Image (cartoon, rainbow, N blue to C red):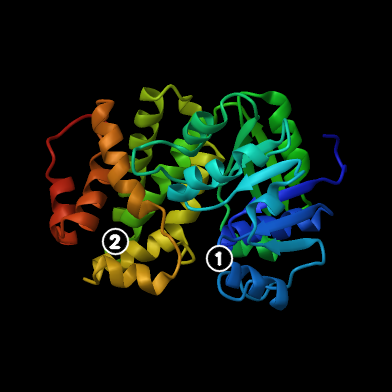
Amino acid sequence: MTSGEKKVVAVMGAGSWGTALGLLLAAGGHETRLWDRTPPFAAVLASDRENRRYLPGFPFPKNILPTAVAAVAVGGADCVVIAVPSHGVRSVLAEVAKRLKPGADIVLAAKGMDSSGLFPSEIATEILGDSFPITALSGPNLAVEVARGVPTAAVAASPDADATERIVDLFSRPAFRVYTGSDRMGVEIGGAVKNVLAIAAGVSDGLGYGDNTKAALLTRGLAEMARLGVASGANVETFYGLAGVGDLMATAASRLSRNWRVGEGIAKGEPLQTILARLGQVAEGVPTAKALVAVAEARGVEMPVCSVVASLLFTGESPIAAVAALLNRSRKGE
């Protein structure tokens, strides 16, 4: 793919993030097929020419083509962007695997893990093998800010250097700068763990603990992210870049973050299901927390902040007691 060449792109997932990416790609002049599994919602997108449910206020240009037919979305597409929640990656890839254009680029924009503890690239490799170049796209990228054209940076990571260059060409816009990377697993680990840590940040803010507490939680959480990454074969430097500390800063500090809002609600004593119903979209940190703890235990990695988040979400532990438990852990060097 050469810079400036117009392509056909399928964006699988019409939530806020998929829609923001669709708008970005369409602004680059690419034919952008925006897929949603639900025919009535796809029809509404087509008639409204706007995603009023998940990303209102951003009209669709004429080269965004909503559809609920997966075969129509991916047929002949040069690139397929997977922007569904992590638990849906497997089903979407399985549905479209035999309909993909040979050699099409697969871009994984989901940030999380499935219930079995697999990251999106691991799922994609299981289903697609090595027939398609697979790139992870991540970074501090809040959907509404990307749609607004706020200056933003991201990283496209793949072991295939040619694939990353193609994805950089495809997604780069004047206000959206994309860097190349080779540590796909590290980028995915950063994208998953930061969502869990953002819940911890929301809990801290919801309890009114202030900046000292949140800074400590996130610093120690970043160390957990790096430990898991190294144990998984990733490069530790990845976690001090856009997909690690960069994404963590955006997600844990912004009230636009769904994961942060989950933590705030937990701190205020709201039931998890009530919080999720109010959000109306998936907060990836919730299912990821449980899978992450299991993976960390299997790999012998200590992740106390993430473990506490899982306890808050699924065992009903008191937020104040959870913070106290973290503070009263045995002394150790940093």
Work out which quarter of the rendered image holds the C terminus and state it: top left
Q: Is residue 75 left or right of residue 87?
A: right
Mark 1: secondary structure: loop
Residue 215 point in image, percent of width and height = 35, 50
Q: Which of labels 2 and 1 is toward the front?
A: 1
Q: Does residue 13 lie above or below 59 as drawn?
A: above
For badge 1, the amino acid type reads Thr
Checking the image for residue 38, the label placed there is 1
Q: How many marks?
A: 2
Q: Which residue is mark 2?
A: 203
The first of marks 2 and 1 along the sequence is: 1
Q: Residue 40, image x and y in percent?
A: 59, 72
The quarter of the image holding the N terminus is top right
Image quarter of residue 112: top left
Q: Is residue 202 above or below residue 53?
A: above
Q: Residue at x 58, y 56 (%)?
A: 13
* Residue 188, placed above or below residue 200: above
Residue 38 appears in which quarter of the rendering?
Answer: bottom right
Front residue (pair 136, 306): 136
What residue lies at 46% left-to-right and 62% top-to-bottom?
A: 257
Report the disc number at residue 53: none
State how far apart marks 2 and 1 are (Cα): 34 Å
Q: Give neighbour class at mark 2: few <14, some 14-19, many 20+ (Cα, 10 Å).
A: many
Q: Estimate the x, y position of residue 9 in percent, counting from the top left.
A: 74, 48
Asked if residue 49 can be seen in this view, the reply is no
Give the side of residue 235 with respect to residue 24, left or right.
left
